[in-house]
Amino acid sequence: MKKLWAPWRMLYILHADNTAETGCIFCTLPKDEDMAKNYVLYKGSRCFVMLNKFPYNTGHIMVAPYAHKDSIEKLDKQESEELMDLVQKSVEILRKAFSPQGFNIGINIGRVAGAGFDGHVHVHIVPRWNGDTNFMPILADVKVVPEGLDETYRRLRPYFEKLEARK
């Protein structure tokens, strides 16, 4: 039998029940100046972009407002506009960096809808490629992500730095 090592998965398993203890990542992580440590790719005036620490696929990013609001209808006009603008720019950047053939873009509102942080609305952007799903999720309940977070961050950050320069 071959072994598939995914030691980062243990962080997810341990994290799943600790969100109340660790606080809201969308409130705490963008305040830290060390963007690379927290995988924050871009800080706008009302919203920011970060890598998903437990990605579904390589390049899985999230866009969130700084304001701790639990649903999109609670965002003001400026937050909504910047959120969607960053979603569009993020898709453009992911196309340049990874050449995906498609995207899943979604918002999970409420725990029952799959929101890991149900108190803070955020948009998931997941690049997709033909054949990126294989037998592993079906037979072993395992998803293979072929690139580490540090490398993905290094690949995407220069694109987001160009956005900062245009502010």
Image (tube, grey):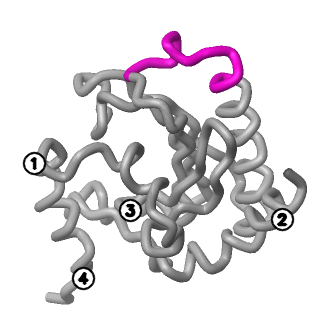
Of the two numbered discs 2 and 3 on the same chain, state the one appearing first in sequence.
3
Kindly identify which numbered label has been placed on residue 135. none
Residue linked to disc 4: 4
Along the viewing direction, whichever of 105 and 49 lies nearer the viewer: 49
Q: Secondary structure at mark 1?
A: loop
Task: Give the residue at x 30% y 30%.
Answer: 118
Of the two numbered discs 1 and 2 on the same chain, state the one appearing first in sequence.
1
Along the viewing direction, whichever of 25 and 142 lies nearer the viewer: 25
Q: Is residue 16 magenta?
A: no
Residue 45 x, y percent position in the rendering: 68, 41
Q: Amino acid at mark 1?
A: Asp
Which quadrant would residue 97 be assigned to in this image? bottom right
Residue 137 x, y percent position in the rendering: 30, 58
Relative vertical location of residue 86 with respect to residue 80 in this rendering, above or below:
below
Task: Give the residue at x 62% y 57%.
Answer: 130
Q: Amino acid at mark 3?
A: Lys
Of the two numbered discs 3 and 4 on the same chain, state the one appearing first in sequence.
4
Of the two numbered discs 1 and 3 on the same chain, state the one appearing first in sequence.
1
Residue linked to disc 3: 53
Q: How many marks?
A: 4
Relative vertical location of residue 79 with respect to residue 134 in this rendering, above or below:
above
Circle 1 crowding by C-alpha within 10 Å: few under 14, some 14–19, many from 20: few
